[in-house]
Image (spheres, rainbow, N blue to C red):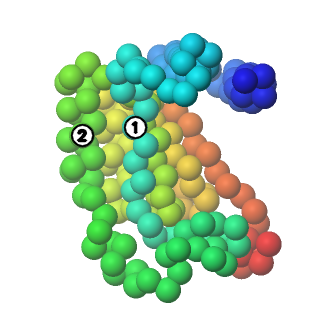
């Protein structure tokens, strides 16, 4: 419990400067962290929550890097050797994700929306989903390798994004993949 508290306190301290820029998103994130901590203290093995607080969308299996330690595309990744067309064919369309978010808000939920993948910047509907979530007032974050971030930076910044997590292991794909 103490190490969990220390990690959450360190995360909060790092985010502190940006908390004042978007107070409505910051409050939502702070409530989520606090409720996780308090729920874990009260009911150590889980329990009922007070509504949906976070939606995690794995948008795509596609990725343009091959990180050695990745469980999907790394040296021993479970997706290695499978046809790329299969991944695109199996993707959920952006209209379905947008409808899901609208339905959640209509039913009184205001979750944070966390998008990941593979590489979410390769998902054809990423920007419309981000823009729709932001329009609904949902704090939206993404975990990306950053290689395609500049292509959509203006629209993502205008949405706005609540948090962009960028994994950087090298300045380009060749050096990144050699690590």
Q: Nearer the viewer, residue 98 or 40?
A: 40
Q: Which residue is mark 1?
A: 55
Is residue 4 visible in the rendered image? The answer is yes
- Quadrant location of the N terminus in the rendered image: top right
Q: Quadrant of residue 173?
A: bottom right
Tell me where residue 3 appears, x and y as whole percent: 78, 28
Instruction: State left or right for residue 15 relative to residue 92.
Output: right
Instruction: Look at the numbered disc 2 and give the secondary structure of its residue.
Output: helix
Instruction: Look at the numbered disc 1 and give the secondary structure of its residue.
Output: strand
Q: Which mark is residue 165?
A: none
Is residue 13 visible in the rendered image? The answer is no
User: Can you say whether 178 is above or below 4 in the image?
Assistant: below
Q: Which mark is residue 100?
A: 2
Instruction: State left or right for residue 97 relative to residue 58.
Output: left
User: Can you say whether 73 is above or below 105 in the image?
Assistant: below
Q: Quadrant of residue 54?
A: top left
Q: Earlier in the sequence, mark 2 or mark 1?
A: 1
Q: Nearer the viewer, residue 139 or 77?
A: 77
Query: Are there few (<14), some (14-19), or many (20+) residues within 10 Å of tag 1?
Result: some
Q: Which residue is drawn at the image coordinates 33% and 72% (left, top)?
A: 88
User: Can you say whether 116 is above or below 21 in the image?
Assistant: below
Instruction: State left or right for residue 78 relative to residue 133.
Output: right
């Amino acid at each position: 419990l103490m190490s969990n508290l220390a990690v959450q306190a360190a995360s909060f301290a790092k985010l502190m400067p940006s908390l004042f820029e978007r107070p409505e998103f910051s409050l939502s994130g702070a409530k989520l962290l606090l409720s996780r901590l308090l729920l874990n203290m009260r009911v150590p093995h889980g329990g009922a929550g007070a509504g949906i607080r976070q939606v995690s969308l794995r948008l795509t299996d596609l990725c343009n890097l091959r990180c050695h330690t990745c469980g999907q595309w790394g040296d021993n990744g479970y997706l290695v050797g499978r046809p790329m067309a299969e991944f695109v064919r199996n993707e959920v369309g952006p209209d379905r994700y947008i409808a899901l978010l609208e339905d959640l808000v209509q039913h009184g939920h205001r979750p944070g929306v966390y998008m990941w993948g593979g590489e979410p910047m390769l998902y054809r509907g990423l920007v419309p989903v981000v823009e729709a979530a932001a329009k609904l007032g949902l704090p939206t974050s993404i975990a990306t390798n950053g290689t395609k971030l500049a292509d959509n930076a203006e629209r993502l910044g205008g949405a706005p994004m609540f948090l962009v997590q960028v994994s950087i292991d090298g300045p380009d794909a060749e050096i990144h993949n050699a690590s």
